[in-house]
Amino acid sequence: RLCAGGPPSLSYQELKDLKTTNVLHIDVRERWEIDRFGKIPASINIPLGELVEALQMDPTEFKEQYNQKMPSKSDPVVFSCLAGTRSKQALGFAMSLGFS
C-alpha cells in the first residue's frame, strides 16, 4: 500500500483512480531519491523539509517554483514517500496549516 498518512491509506490502484480526478499528488521524498528511484507520474516533488514553507507561499510563487497550481485548503491532496513516515509527517504539517 502507498503511504498516505495514517488512515486513510491508499492502495496503488486507489491512487491511480484518484489521479483521474482533481487530486494533487505531492511526493515528499528528497530530490536525490527522485533521481535514483524515479518520479511518480503526475506528481510534484516537494521535499518534506520544504513543505511547510511551500504550503504557505503566495500562489503565484508556488506556481513558479513547482509548475503546478497551489492547492487550496480544501483541495484533495495525497502525500507519498518511500516508507510512509514522511508522508504521515506531511499530512500532519498540512493539517496544522488548516488543510482539510
Image (cartoon, rainbow, N blue to C red):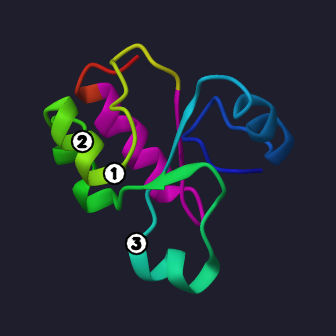
3D distance between C-alphas at marks 2 and 1: 6 Å
Residue type beneath disc 1: Tyr
Dot 2: element: helix
**Residue found at x 28% / y 49%:** 51
The number of numbered badges drawn on the structure is 3
Which of the two labelled residues, at mark 1 and mark 3, occupies the earlier sequence position? Answer: 3
**Residue found at x 60% / y 64%:** 83
Q: Check contact, mark 2 vs mark 1: CB within 8 A.
A: yes
Which residue is under mark 2?
62
Q: Which mark is residue 66?
A: 1
The quadrant in which residue 38 appears is bottom right
Number of residues whose C-alpha sits closer than 10 Å to that of mark 1, classed few (under 14), some (14–19) or many (20 or more):
few
Q: Is residue 29 left or right of residue 52?
A: right
**Residue 55 coordinates in the image, percent (x, y):** 25, 37
Residue 87 painted magenta: yes
Q: Is residue 91 left or right of residue 16?
A: left
Q: Is residue 65 above or below residue 71?
A: below
**Residue found at x 37% / y 33%:** 69
Q: Is residue 11 left or right of residue 88?
A: right
**Residue 92 coordinates in the image, percent (x, y):** 36, 36
Q: Which mark is residue 30?
A: 3
Dot 3: element: loop
Question: Looking at the image, which is closer to me, 59 or 50?
Answer: 59
**Residue found at x 52% / y 22%:** 76
Residues shaded magenta:
77-95
Disc nearest the viewer among 2 and 3: 2
Residue type beneath disc 2: Phe
The quadrant in which residue 22 appears is top right
